[in-house]
Image (cartoon, grey):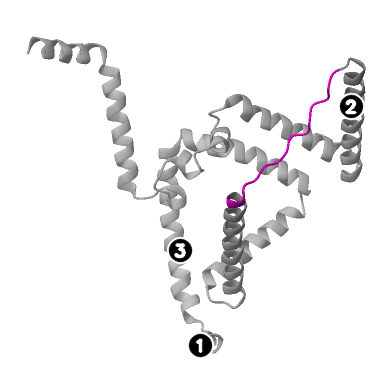
Amino acid sequence: MENSADFVDRMDGNGGETRKDTAASDSCSSSTIASGYRLFGRQASLHQFMGGGKAADVILWKRRHVSFGVIVVATIAWFIFERSGLPFLTICSDVLLVVTVLLFFHTKFAAIRNKQPQSLPELVLSEEMVNNAAASFRVKINNVLLLAHDITIGKDFRLFFKVVVCLWLLSAVGSYFSFFTLAYAGTILSITIPALYSKYEEHIDKYCGMIHRKLSHHYKIVDESVISRIPHSLSKDKDA
């Protein structure tokens, strides 16, 4: 009994901050559960939602050196392809030319020093791995084709509306920025936004839940006043 009392005293005296942190995290998690909204409708953690592998570690800055290296490489590549004024084919040819010349001189220098050049590594793929990849690729392609079929024949008007809006936004943005600028911006956003979201997850989920409820309310009004008034004979003719 004395040992347990001493342990409680030590926890109260030295571990007060830990207890407060635990209580704070419990209150935050309970508030998130009470709000009933998590971004992308996920149930697992953000790291698990993104696959839980090395790519997720890099995107969430669990490997800071690699994440910073991605930003540096993307910035240098954007500067070379976008600001240098050289055509893309010229840059690729120059890079391949430099690499080929360096490898040639490296091999000749190794021969002069009586060193064997390194053998080319072979790509080894098992039959089971190839079959699994082909089956997964086939399923994804069929799902995309089925989704495109449903959009074109007008089965899902909401999905059709979302696709039209997204394509229009891409067309509008593409008229102001080049492909390399968009690719660079996408790379920077993909390496920074998930990390910021992981840091302020509960606050973002809270405000996104409020925005989602408001947008759902307005969309319901539009659905009841506009979409529901579309004649059902059109859909019946399409189904027939």
Report helix, strand or loop for mark 2: helix
Q: Are marks 2 and 1 in contact (CB under 8 Å)?
A: no
Q: Are marks 3 and 1 in contact (CB under 8 Å)?
A: no
Q: Position of residue 36 (x, y in %)?
A: 34, 50
Report helix, strand or loop for mark 1: helix
Report the front residue among 168 and 87.
87
Nearer to us: label 3 or label 1:
1
Task: Work out whether mark 2 precedes mark 1 in sequence or the reverse, and give the earlier one.
Answer: 2
Task: Work out whether mark 3 precedes mark 2 in sequence or the reverse, and give the earlier one.
Answer: 2
| Residue that appears at 53% across and 37% down | 53
Neighbourhood count class around disc 2 (C-alpha, 10 Å): few under 14, some 14–19, many 20 upward: few
Count of all numbered marks drawn on residues in the image:
3
Q: Position of residue 101 (x, y in %)?
A: 92, 29
Mark 3–mark 1 Cα distance, whole angstroms, equals 28 Å
Neighbourhood count class around disc 1 (C-alpha, 10 Å): few under 14, some 14–19, many 20 upward: few
Q: Which residue is mark 1?
A: 236
Q: Disc 3 residue type?
A: His
Task: Work out whether mark 3 precedes mark 1 in sequence or the reverse, and give the earlier one.
Answer: 3
Q: Quadrant of residue 89?
A: top right
Q: Position of residue 203 (x, y in %)?
A: 42, 39
Q: Disc 2 residue type?
A: Leu
Q: Which residue is mark 2?
A: 102
Q: Are marks 3 and 2 in contact (CB under 8 Å)?
A: no
